[in-house]
Image (cartoon, coloured by chain):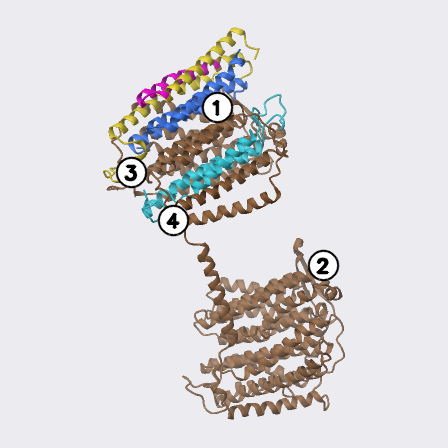
Chain colours: A yellow, B cyan, C blue, D brown
Amino acid sequence: MNALPLWLDAIIAALLVVGAAFALVGAYGLAKLGDFMKRLHGPTKATTLGVGCVLLASLLWFLGTPGTPHGREILIAAFLFVTAPVSGHLLVVAAMRMDQAARPAPTEGRSSTRSVPARDET
Amino acid sequence: MELALSIAIGLLIAAGTWLALRARTFDLVLGLTLLSYAVNLAIFAMGRLAPGKPPLVREGTAGALATHADPLPQALVLTAIVISFAMTALLLAIAVRSRAANRSDHVDGGGGDGA
Amino acid sequence: MTAAVLPFVVGALALAMLLSLLRLLRGPGIADRVLALDTLYVCTLALLVVLGIQWRDGVYFEAALLIGLLGFIGTVALGRYVERGKVIG
Amino acid sequence: MTALPLLLALPFVAALALAALPRLSRTAAALVAGAATLGGLALLGGMAGAVADGEVLRFKLDWLPSLGLAFSLRVDGLAWMFAAIVLGIGALVVLYARWYLADEDPPARFFAMLSLFMGAMLGVTLAGNLLLLVVFWELTSISSFLLIGFWHRRADARAGARMALTITGMGGLCLLAGVLLIGRIAGSFELDVVLAAGEAIRAHALYEPALALVLLGAFTKSAQFPFHSWLPHAMAAPTPVSAYLHSATMVKAGVFLIARLHPALAGSEAWFWMVVPVGLATLVVGAALALVQQDLKGLLAYSTISHLGLITLLFGLDTELAVVAGVFHILNHATFKASLFMAAGIIDHETGSRDFRRLNGLWKHMPVTGALAIVASLAMAGVPLLNGFLSKEMFLAETLATESHALMEFLVPAGALVAGIFAVAYSLRFVHDVFFNGEPVGLDRVPHEPPRFMRVPVEVLVVLCLVVGMFPQHTIGPLLALGVQGVLQGPAPEYKLAIWHGFNLPLALSAIGLVGGVALYFGLQRGINLHRIERASTGKRVFDALVRRLVDLARRVTRALENGSLQRYLLLLVLAAVVLGGAPLLEAGPGFGDPPGTPAGIAGWLALALLVAGVLAVLRWYRERLLAVIAVGVVGLAVSLLFVLLSAPDLALTQLLVEVASVLLILLALRFLPQQSPPERRRGRAWLHGVVAGAFGAGVATAVYAVLTRPTRSISDYFLRTTVPEGGGANAVNVIIVDYRGFDTLGEIAVFGIAGLLLHALLRGRAGVPGTLVPPQPARPAFLLQVSAQVLLPLAIAVSLYLFLRGHNAPGGGFIAGLVLALGVALQALAAGREALGAPDGRTWQAWIAWGLVVATLGGIGSFLFGHPFLTSSTPYVDLPLVGAVPFASATVFDTGVYLVVAGATLLMLAMLARVHAQAGDR
């Protein structure tokens, strides 16, 4: 890959390292922080950002390397930035719903077996 | 990597079989899912492990096993993945129906939900 | 230079995924596990991109693309299941 | 020689026609069957000249050359003679049955079966290949089964049919085995070869077993002692059947076989000692039992057995003159016994009874029938001036000429004499006890002569008995000569067909027989009134006992294996797999090669770590089902990653998509299942399963590793070499799927589509499935999700099309693109509800599946237009913006079909599972 000019190479390397670092930090946070609402921050912010950096790096790299397809990174990034918040938000909702129902995850089934009858729309 | 992969496949097989031997429909579904992973990996491995050589014959390169992974097992496994997906779906439907009919998710029906 | 850092990048991502796995196994809440799974997917996406650079090969971009596009469906579905008890209303 | 196959075809054609026209009247049906018979006779007559000149007519059509099974027909004297009997008697029986059948009997069915049998029997006689002969042989057993059970509402008919089929069927199997042995010895199953190889066969080490097996077949068919007991029970059949199958033709198949293979098998000590004793025993036992029957047909049946024994005995004695006598008696017995059966049938028909104890003094009611029956009986008894006498004389002469062990030299003639005495006695009883000896007892109607034409066949046969009996040389002579030449495969010996051979020992024996018989009969009637003898058939008892044993055994085995637990079956299945797979592995050893040691790299180890952790998590959590689903997700991700690392991009894509789709499906279904599995009630069983599963896993792992460490010999070089130039695509995997193995793929998408439809059928209109989770909360509108979904749908479609079009050259293709599309739509449903999944009855997606299959097939046919065989693609490229060169191949059309089916079926599954909803008032 000596096709790349040094400065570009440096930027790419830097972006990669930073991105990896962010991803790592995010995951670390997920692993270490105290309760769910705190943990949520790690992946949703750090990791996403990290992936963004990595994508940028890849974009630059392929731009610098002729004869390879490029541009799709943008697409990926776009997708990611649309979807990541959605899933994050949904998980928050879910977590809240569970807290309020004061139901430890594994055992909804149990408690439900003697819970309110199902009303079903349609 | 060969040894590790073989062991992993073996583990999948063992776990899948054990789960498939459980008495509840859903456990059976889980087991068969694991089993299909294992079988797909095994068939795929029959083409030997060739990292970094996707079976795409690009301009300028001559297609040969030396420079490309074996495409045949891949083709077989691709359809196999889809088919096993269909099988999972079918089993789930049957599980739902059988429970609706027997008020139990025991594979032999009856015996209540146990849960 | 890029070549030099790539192994560390891959390593870091791998470590990140192992950490997520840890959370997935520890729980405690179901939401934690789902979140961890989601993170695993995202990290895999990053890993694929990096591997793409390492192998100077764009073939795996489609995989990354699909994770970015559809990977979160699983998360959404699980979240929905926990939240409402039914995935598709 | 086309007349030959035609001759054989005729009866089968008639059978089919009759089966196709079940509404035919009695007359019409009889005409159809009769036409076939007469046509056959005409064809046979056409061959007479050639055969008489000692010519052998052949027709050969290779069938399964690899097995030496040829459809070859062969007519020599013996075959011709037998065919003549089959067709001749057949014609008379058809005529007779026309009048015999009652209004409630379905005539078409009867004549269809009869014609079927006629065809089968002709096949046996004309077959020129032993395997073919066995085929027809079994067919006669089957048609006999059908005919005996014709009155299928009668228990005795069913039982008799079953017994006959079982015994003759087993015989048929023995025969098959024997024939296979002979074929191996002679090097061919062609009759010509086998008959010429007599020396070699007799010299071969396997001669005795082969002979024994063939004879078992013959003896069971010809009701030889101790296999005779099926024949009396076959008398439950309509009388025409008894006259035809069970006296004139089918039971003769056994002796025919003995005669047919005489040149190949006979002429040895073994032959003598295997055939003669059986024949002798049958001769005597049959005759003795015939006397004590209370049923007309029963008496005739046992007498038939006895006469078959006589013929067998003659062939066993194995002198040329004995052969002459044997063939002669086949002819004679066919005539007089058939006529007697028909007479018995008439009596039954007119009086409604076949019981000696009730039938008496019928002479004054039906003198004509009586006269006919009397003549026939006398022939059966062997009274001079009737055909029975001639062959009996010859028989006695041969028994006296027996040269063998001293014991046999005494036993054979002695037995013959005793049997002769009994024969006279039971013939006399048939006459005296039915037509005289007092008045009828308790008949519900006044007997009278039968309709004119019902008697004609009997008259014909009886006239034959007389004519042959008086002028043998000019009547039966030529036919007999033909038959004998056929059996001996050479010139017939010197013999004289005459009534008067001068005073000699045979004549004396006949005289003793006559006198003794008369004395015996009247003696018995005076002493112990024959009417009082009540006899149950021992054979039947033994047979039933054996069958019962067998059934009990089967039941025990079944009960032991099938206890109704699917779990148990699966365990047995896995156990079997472990044992069958493991045994050779342990025996031969895994045979590892030297590991190539492919480097895993960080990513590789990561993937494997994820996989292992995921599997363990599944095992740990399988009872908490939601958690298990998440753990499975991890495994799936790891597998996809492995596919990436091992350079299988297409698989990686497919696996990822399937993961997502599976999670959706599972969650949709899980709502209607318990959220947990109960704890293992029986830890012991769980451990046992653990051991078995562990063994299974270990075995597979070993096998996989063994393969991985051995050199590969893949055919894929070809695919890789030709994928671009011939397949027109750089992505070898996709090219294989849509092109090289397109036909498989067609099948696979068909399966996929069927799975979708099946699921639809299972869940169609399911309301009120018990749910278990919390009642669904009032859905808060999830704007974020809805918006993003709306944004993503067009993108998803775009990506799907992109992947589809690029599929031929880059990762992608119909399967992957279809899944992408399906998930894009599923996302809409997640956001906006199940309405997004199309018509509630899923008809939208059914249409997709249907069209997909149509398109795929058309794409396959399309390649014809390019002048290639089915499903081979030809590839003009077209350039699309953004996507680049796209092969517009017939393969692309095919792939479109795949695309539609995959998307459609996946969405159908999702839609149907999404439609299931919990019943009100659920627990």
Question: How many residues crowd mark 1 within 10 Å: few (<14), some (14–19), many (20+)?
Answer: many
Instruction: State the SS at label 3.
Output: helix
Say which residue label 2 marks: D187
Say if D891 sits above or below D363 in the image: above
Give the chain of mark 1: C
Amino acid, disc 2: Gly
Q: Is any part of residue D871 visible from this angle?
A: no
Locate the C terminus of chain D by quadrant. top left
Foreground residue among B110 and D389: B110
Q: Which chain is home to disc 3?
A: A
Q: Which residues are magenta?
A: A32-57
Between the C-alphas of marks 3 and 1, the distance is 42 Å
Quick check: D218 above or below D477?
Answer: above
Amino acid type at circle 1 is Glu
* Residue type indicated by callout 3: Arg
Q: Secondary structure at mark 1?
A: helix
Q: CA distance from mark 3 to mark 4?
A: 22 Å
| Spot occupied by residue A105 in the image (x, y as percentages of width and height) | 31, 31
The residue type indicated by label 4 comes to Asp
Q: Where residue D197 sits: x, y (%)?
A: 74, 64
User: Badge 1 is on which residue?
Assistant: C62
Using the image, determine if residue D217 lies above or below residue C13. below
Q: Give me the residue at 51% from left, 16% from top.
A: C6
| Residue pointed to by mark 4 | B108
Are both tags, 4 and 1, on one chain?
no
Magenta stretch secondary structure, dominant: helix
